[in-house]
Structures are given as structure tokens and as C-alpha cells.
Image: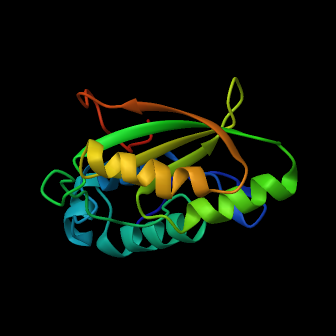
Amino acid sequence: MDVDADAATPRGSEREIDKIDRRILRVLQEDGRISNLKLAETVHLSPTAVLERVKRLTRDGYILGYEARLNPEKLGAGLLVFVEVLLDRTVHDVMDTFKAAVQVRTEILEAHLVAGGFDYLLKTRVADMAAYREFIGSVIWTLPGVRETRTYAVMEEVKNSARVPL
């Protein structure tokens, strides 16, 4: 049986994570498909203890899910475009309808409400510039409350990571 010498103190219904949990998260960020046995060997715990920790980390919201990283070039979505969106009014009903409309568009990978000179920053992927012209006209400009946009087409992805520093 493994004993956690570093177990953190409980906080509400969830525990704070300790250095072993951080090692587990680090390894899972590197390889989300690692077997439980290999993960256990890597962090020097029994497979049962690691499985329980991963379940707890998932239950407590530290692990949101697992997904494969796909090659957008091979899948016809080679053009990455960031779009600044300025809404005509920043009141809750306009923002809520905008957020709901963005949720259903698969071309919009990320949408962030930001502070500054515009309201939302969208990360989008489409096949090419012709597809983007169609997308901006038929999708972005039809989203509720859009007053102004600025487009930034990516010429080269220098770094692309979703990893959280641990």
C-alpha cells in the first residue's frame, strides 16, 4: 500500500494537489495515452494508487478530458486566423447571444472575452483564404451584435501548445 507523505490538506470537498499529483499531470500532458502501469512506474507508485489519483484529479476538475491532436493541414483546415470582434453593445443579452452563437460553430476553435480595445478574440481554422472570406461573410458578420472585426491570418505557427505549466 502506498502512503502519501506529501498529502495536502483538504479544501472544501476537494484536496489541493501535491508533488506526486503534479508529476502525474505533467506525464499525462506529455502522453495522454500512457497506460496506467507505465504511469505508475514513471511516478513511482502502485498502479492502484495512480488510478485513484487520476480519478480524483478528474473528479476535482484538474483533468478536463483527453483528446488527440490532429494535423489541420491534412484535414483541410490549414489556415489559422485570429479575429478581433467588437460588439455594438456590451450588455449581457448581446454578449450571451454572441457566446451561444459562437458555441455551435466548429470553425471557431476558441473564443475569449478580453479586456482592451475589442471584446472577443476568436481563434478559427479554415481551409484557405477563400474559405475564410466565405466564413467571415456568412458566419462572423452574422453573429449577434458584431459591429467591427479585425483579421490576423497566421503565416507561420511558431509554437502551438495547450500544456499548462506545472
Provide residue 63's location: percent of width, then percent of height.
48, 61
- 148 or 97, nearer to the observer: 148
- 70 or 58, nearer to the observer: 70
Residue pictured at 28% horizontal, 55% vertical = 44
Provide residue 64's location: percent of width, then percent of height.
49, 63
In the rendered image, the quadrant that contains the C terminus is top left
Total residue callouts: 0
Q: Is residue 65 left or right of residue 29?
A: right
Vertical position of residue 95 compared to residue 151: above or below: below
Tell me where residue 14 sits by quadrant: bottom right
Q: Is residue 83 left or right of residue 30?
A: right
Q: Is residue 13 left or right of residue 8?
A: right
Q: Residue furthest top?
A: 117
- 77 or 136, nearer to the observer: 136
Residue pictured at 45% horizontal, 73% vertical = 52
Q: Residue furthest left?
A: 74
Residue pictured at 62% horizontal, 51% vertical = 8
Residue pictured at 28% horizontal, 47% vertical = 130
Vertical position of residue 115 compared to residue 97: above or below: above
Q: How is the image coloured?
A: rainbow
Q: Is residue 20 left or right of residue 116?
A: left
In the rendered image, the quadrant that contains the N terminus is bottom left
Provide residue 141's location: percent of width, then percent of height.
57, 50
Provide residue 53's location: percent of width, then percent of height.
46, 66
Q: Say whether residue 1 is visible.
A: no
- 148 or 59, nearer to the observer: 148
Q: Say whether residue 104 is visible.
A: yes
